Image (cartoon, grey):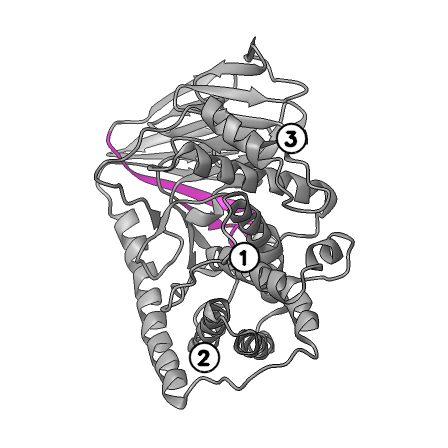
Amino acid sequence: MKRFVVPGVSILGFLWISIAAAAEPATPTAAAVIAEFNRMAGLPLWPGFDPKTVPLAIYDGERTVLVRHPSPPPGFKREGEVWVYPGQHPEMRANTSMELGGATTATLLLDSGKGRDARHWASVMMHETFHVFQRKKHPSWAGNEAELFTYPLEDAGRLASRRLETDALRRALASQDAKQAACWTVKALALRRQRYGSLPAGSEAYEQGTELNEGLATFIENLALGETKGPDLPAGEYPAGDVRSRAYAIGYADATLLDRFDPGWRKALEVGQGASLDELLTKALNGKPVSACAFSAEESAAALARAKEDIARFVQEKQQLREAFLSRPGWRIEILSSAQPLWPQGFDPLNVVALGKGEVLHRRWVKLGNGDSTIEVLDRESLTEGAGEHPLFNGLRRLIITGLPDEPKVRQEGGFLVLDAGGVTAKLKGAVAETSGSVVKIKMP
C-alpha cells in the first residue's frame, strides 16, 4: 500500500496528512503520467526489471485508464492504445498492486495526494510497478502484515535504541568521508543486532521483510526521479508506533549505502546472495577501513528519556482515539458475527491503529466478509474486534461504525440484508437488523 505526502505529528505514526501549497498545481492527466513513466522505464533501475511489461491502471478523478493490460475487465472500452472505464473502478482503492482482470496490475489514484506533477506521479507508479516485479520474482521479499498488529511497541529501551540506529544511518548518509560513513553504518548495524536480541522473531522478520518490500520500491521510485543521496532521515526519528513507514525509509537508506559500499549488491540480491538489506550491508562493510565514531553518554540518555515520554503519550493517545471514536455523535452501526467470524479481505496498513485488547481502528478503509457476505467501509473510520488471539487474522466478531450523519438504509433482498450508509456498504446473508434510537445492530447467523 502506498503513501501520503507528509507524516503527521501524531505519536501513533499511522496518521498521515497532506499540506497544500499556496498555489497548488493541477492534477496532471493520465496521459502525461504515462509519458513520464515510459521515459523512466528506459533507465537502468534494477537487474531484470522491465516496467513496460507490467499492466497499469490509473484513476484520474473522472475515469480509470488501463495501459498494456492483456484482459481488461467488463466495463472498459478501448480508446486508442488504452482502455477506459467511466469513473473509479470498484477494485481501485489505493496506490498498490493487485489482481485486475486476471493480471497483476500496478494501480495509481491521482486524487490520493495533492501538489505532485506528472513526473512525481510517474515515480509513484514506478514504485508500484516494482512491487509487481517483486511479487512475481521474489515473493519472500515482504513482511507479514499480521506481525504489525502484535509488534511490541511500548518498550522505551527498544525505542531509544531504534532511534539511535536511525540517527547513525542519518549521519552515515550525510558524511562525505568514506571512513566516517562506514563507521556510522557499522554503529547502526550493531544497535540493530542489540535491539533484535530482545524482539520476537516475527517482529524482526517483519522489519527486514518490509525493508526489502517497501524500502527497495522506495529506492527505485527515487532512482527514477534521479535522486541518489538517499532519504532525509529526520533527526527526531519516527513516532513510537510508526514501524511500517519507518521501514520504507530505512530500507531506502540501506539500499543507498549499499550503492556506496558495494556497487554490485543489486545483482547479488537479485540472484539470491543475501536474505536482508542489513545482512548485505554487514558483508559489504567487512574489512572496510573505518574511523572512530560514537554517541555520547548525553545523547544516549536523552534518547532514553524522550522514548519514555513518547511511550507514555503513545498509550494515552490510543485511549483518546478510542474514546473519541466511540463518543462521536450521529448514527452508529454495530455488526455482530456469531458462529462464523468475519475475515479481513482488504485494509490500508498505513491507516490503522492497534488499540489493544483485540481492537483495531481503521482510519480509511477496510473490507470484511465470510461466505457470501461482504462489508466495506471506505473513507470513514471503523473499529474491529478480534474473535481470537490475533486482533485481525483469527477472524473478527464485531465491526463498529460511528458518526454517521444520516440514518442507514437497510433492506432485505433475496435472503440478504443490504446496507448503504454513506461510505458503508454491506450484503449479509441471513442477517437481521434492530434499530434502537440512533443505533442499528445487525446480527449475522
Bin the neighbour count of mark 2 within 10 Å (Cα to Cα): few under 14, some 14-19, many 20 and up.
some
Task: Identify the residue under disc 3.
Answer: 52
- On the rendered structure, is 278 left or right of 245? right
Are the residues flagged by discs 3 and 1 in contact, CB closer than 8 Å?
A: no
Task: Identify the residue under disc 1.
Answer: 252
The residue range painted magenta reads: 383-405
Tell me the element at label 3. helix
Task: Identify the residue under disc 2.
Answer: 157
Q: Amino acid at mark 3?
A: Lys
Bin the neighbour count of mark 3 within 10 Å (Cα to Cα): few under 14, some 14-19, many 20 and up.
some
Are the residues flagged by discs 2 and 3 in contact, CB closer than 8 Å?
A: no
Bin the neighbour count of mark 1 within 10 Å (Cα to Cα): few under 14, some 14-19, many 20 and up.
many
Is 367 in front, or is 327?
367
Residue 145 vertical position relative to residue 342 in the rendered view, above or below: below
In space, the residues marked 2 and 3 are separated at their CA atoms by: 46 Å
Q: Residue at x 66, y 18 (%)?
A: 71
Q: Earlier in the sequence, mark 3 or mark 1?
A: 3
Answer whether residue 430 is visible to the viewer in this image. Answer: no
